[in-house]
Image: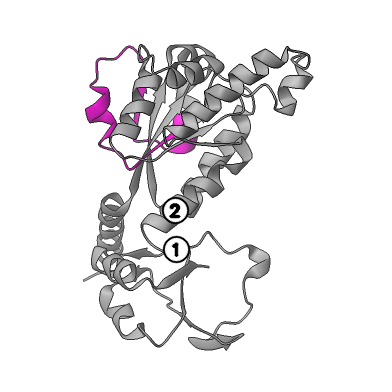
Amino acid sequence: MSDISIEIIKRIVEEVVKKFLSKKILVVFTGGKVNFDISLEELKKIKENSMVQYTLVFSRAASQIFNKKIISDQLDSVEVIEEGETINAREFVQKHDMVVFATLTRNTASKISHLILDTLPAQIAINGVLSGIPVIAVRDAADLSIETWGKLGFSDFPPALKNAYDKIFRDIESYGIGLCRSFELAKRVLSHLNRNSLLVSEKVNEGQKREEVSKFYSDDETKHVKLEKKLITREDIVGLKGNVDVIEIPNDSIMTPLAMDFIRENRLKVVKT
């Protein structure tokens, strides 16, 4: 078999495995512009550090404010939905592993808090909760206490109004929806993905990479092994159980489903370097 044929087969296998293993995240954009650029960079970071597929949903306001094509291209999304399209929100949400509100406006936050389900974003949030699907929302565009709002002139409002907004956030969190700042989004999502699927850490920073790594080595009483393979199978790791604490794999490598199952079942620590 020629080198070209082998390379084509490898690419096909990689694409099939990636599609099979990728977590499907439903990303919702409402019309909030506060720290939107940070949220977008955090979404890119998530994709760089994990195997995910994005489906994007734009509210009516977001469709008018943001360039959907540019955002879709930057996030390499598999599908883009605009509010107004005919979809079953419950069935649509249940096709995904997680819901992320990259932007959450005051209007949408209020609707979720009061269970007013007359918009697609509010329906997605509540259907996610009812379906047991984790929902994480960036609060920056809805939280008047954030410094960005002060710069926009929203710095002197009655305590009663602040209390009302605080109650909205308490209600949302009481439903099981996680709220975070824009700069915390990648950390929150990756933490959940790693905790609930594979114990795979984020990419090791360049400064943390070791200049020389032998196949087996110890560091502070921790036993490591580094697998220099593009495609890692169950056979590659089954003999490592009980013998090593950390398995290092190349950053661009992929694992077969059986390898993923073995790591999950035996709670092995895997680090991409």
Q: Which residue is mark 2?
A: 50
Residue 189 drawn at (x, y percent): 48, 46
Q: Quadrant of residue 253?
A: bottom left
Q: Amino acid at mark 1?
A: Val
Q: Residue at x 35, y 34 (%)?
A: 129
Q: Residue at x 46, y 15 (%)?
A: 63
Q: What is the span of residues highlighted in magenta in the rendered image? A: 71-100
The answer to whether residue 251 is left or right of residue 80 is: right
Task: Say which label, 1 or 2, has the lower sequence index.
Answer: 2
Q: Which residue is mark 1?
A: 200
From the viewer's side, name the closer residue of 123 and 205. Answer: 123
Q: Secondary structure at mark 1?
A: loop
Residue 225 drawn at (x, y percent): 46, 82
The answer to whether residue 9 is left or right of residue 73 is: left
Q: Which mark is residue 239?
A: none
Q: Residue at x 46, y 33 (%)?
A: 174
Q: Quadrant of residue 141?
A: top right
Residue 30 drawn at (x, y percent): 49, 20
Q: Looking at the picture, does residue 118 appear above or below residue 177?
A: above
The answer to whether residue 29 is left or right of residue 183 is: left
- Residue 142 visible from this viewpoint: no
Q: Amino acid at mark 2?
A: Ser
Q: Looking at the picture, does residue 51 appear above or below residue 64?
A: below
- Residue 107 visible from this viewpoint: yes
